[in-house]
Image: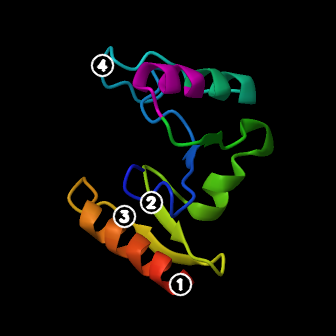
Amino acid sequence: MDSYGDRVDMITVYIEEAHAVDEWPIGSRICYVQPKCDADRIHIANDFIKATEYRIPLLIDPVSKQNPFSEVYCPWPIRFYVIDHMKKLSYIAEPIEGSFPLELIRNALDDAIQQCQ
């Protein structure tokens, strides 16, 4: 965000609790059950923002509408998308051996920015 914040709009979409204690617990660090309503998901998102001082705007995928973002974009477990100036997906980052090569994401952002100029 520090590198691109003034040139691109960034958002995060909280889709669901990856390691909810009632579904797939991985230890004591995560202490939430899977949200059953929008208010629960908002509460968890707000806790995350406060705990991490998260600065990128964070939206929720509404439980009340059957998680439409997840249905359309299949972002599980995590994805990075670049949407270009024509409002088309120009890049979808998928994990390689469990992580995301940030250089590939930077290249995609740089390409999208260059297309706008």
Q: Give the mark toward the camera: 1 or 3.
A: 1
Q: Which label is found at residue 94? A: 3
Left or right: 52 as drawn, with respect to 40? left
Mark 1 surroundings: few (<14), some (14-19) or many (≥20) residues within 10 A: few
Q: Is residue 34 visible?
A: no
Left or right: 113 as drawn, with respect to 62? left
Instruction: Report x, y in % for residue 6.
Output: 51, 57
Secondary structure of residue under mark 2: strand
- Residue shown at the point (72%, 37%) measured from the top left: 63
Toward the left, the furthest residue is: 97
- Rounded to the nearest angstrom, the CA distance separating label 4 from label 3 is 25 Å
Question: Label 4 sits on what residue type?
Answer: Gly
Secondary structure of residue under mark 4: loop
* Residue on which disc 2 sits: 80
Mark 2 surroundings: few (<14), some (14-19) or many (≥20) residues within 10 A: some
Q: Earlier in the sequence, mark 2 or mark 3?
A: 2
Instruction: Report x, y in % for residue 108.
Output: 39, 74
Q: Earlier in the sequence, mark 4 or mark 3?
A: 4
* Residue on which disc 4 sits: 27
- Rounded to the nearest angstrom, the CA distance separating label 1 from label 4 is 47 Å
| CB contact under 8 Å: marks 1 and 3 | no
Secondary structure of residue under mark 3: loop
Residue 88, picture quadrant: bottom right
Question: Label 1 sits on what residue type?
Answer: Gln
Question: Is the residue 31 above or below the residue 91 in the image?
Answer: above
| CB contact under 8 Å: marks 2 and 1 | no
* Residue on which disc 1 sits: 117
Between 94 and 87, the residue placed more toward the observer is 87
Q: Please provide the residue range marked out in magenta.
A: 45-54
Mark 3 surroundings: few (<14), some (14-19) or many (≥20) residues within 10 A: some
